Amino acid sequence: DAGVIQSPRHEVTEMGQEVTLRCKPISGHNSLFWYRQTMMRGLELLIYFNNNVPIDDSGMPEDRFSAKMPNASFSTLKIQPSEPRDSAVYFCASSLAGTLGFFGQGTRLTVV
Amino acid sequence: AQKVTQAQTEISVVEKEDVTLDCVYETRDTTYYLFWYKQPPSGELVFLIRRNSFDEQNEISGRYSWNFQKSTSSFNFTITASQVVDSAVYFCALSPTNTGNQFYFGTGTSLTVIP
């Protein structure tokens, strides 16, 4: 199994641009999570899906952030427009009903 | 409330010393999972262990061991004979099974092993 796959690994973009982060969960897992990690705030849960349905998006910072999971094998996190304070490492994780929770390698986003 | 507390922000030990990383959790759920993850300097989050709330047996994996005590709501992690490669940030996490399988992370403990 290839594990959770995130792309891109690194993204540098200018303020105001749209950014799309992608995640492919482990096949068969029914829960998917997006986390953001910064030095100041640590690991923050942004949103999580169960069976492709968003369950809790209370961690999404503001309307500039949106996440979708059109099918069981793909999810996106979009930031539009991006701002420098969005610079962070964004992790995607998947799990099956509280069992092993594996993380992707993360996307390091830099907004200049 | 669901909460994980890792009171030790930073720990430094000399190579070959043993070190214990503390984790205290809070949950109203009767069934839950506890996890430890390692985040080395390269940045990825590496799964180390999962423990079911019904299983209080301690676990040993090589130089790593975990002590789960429901009476004190703790899930401590011990590294025996530490090595430089153990230097990383270690996160403890809680996943209550009745609240949608969320993961609640502690703030992490940064471990530095000095050669």
Image (spheres, rainbow, N blue to C red):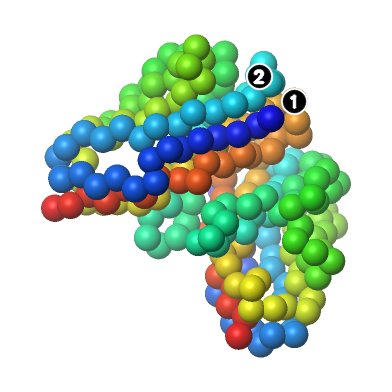
Chain ID for label 1?
Answer: B
Whole-percent x, y for residue B64 in the image:
31, 32
Q: Residue at x 84, y 48 (%)?
A: A54
- Tell me the residue that label 1 is attached to: B98
Q: Secondary structure at mark 2?
A: loop
Q: Amino acid at mark 1?
A: Asn
Whole-percent x, y for residue A91 in the image:
60, 57
Image height check: is B108 above or below A89? above
Q: Are marks 1 and 2 in contact (CB under 8 Å)?
A: yes
Asked if badges 1 and 2 are on one and the same chain, I answer yes
- Tell me the residue that label 2 is attached to: B31
Which residue occupies the foreground of this view, B71 or B59? B71
**Badge 2, how many Cα within 10 Å: few under 14, some, many 20+?**
few
Q: Amino acid at mark 2?
A: Thr
Image height check: is B103 above or below B40? above
Image height check: is A95 above or below A84? above
Chain ID for label 2?
Answer: B
Splitting the image into 4 quarters, where does residue A36 fall? bottom right
Q: Residue at x 43, y 38 (%)?
A: B7
Q: Looking at the rendering, in which quadrant would you find the N terminus of chain B? A: top right
Asked if residue B77 lies left or right of residue A35, the reply is left
Q: Sequence-wise, which precedes: disc 1 or disc 2? A: 2
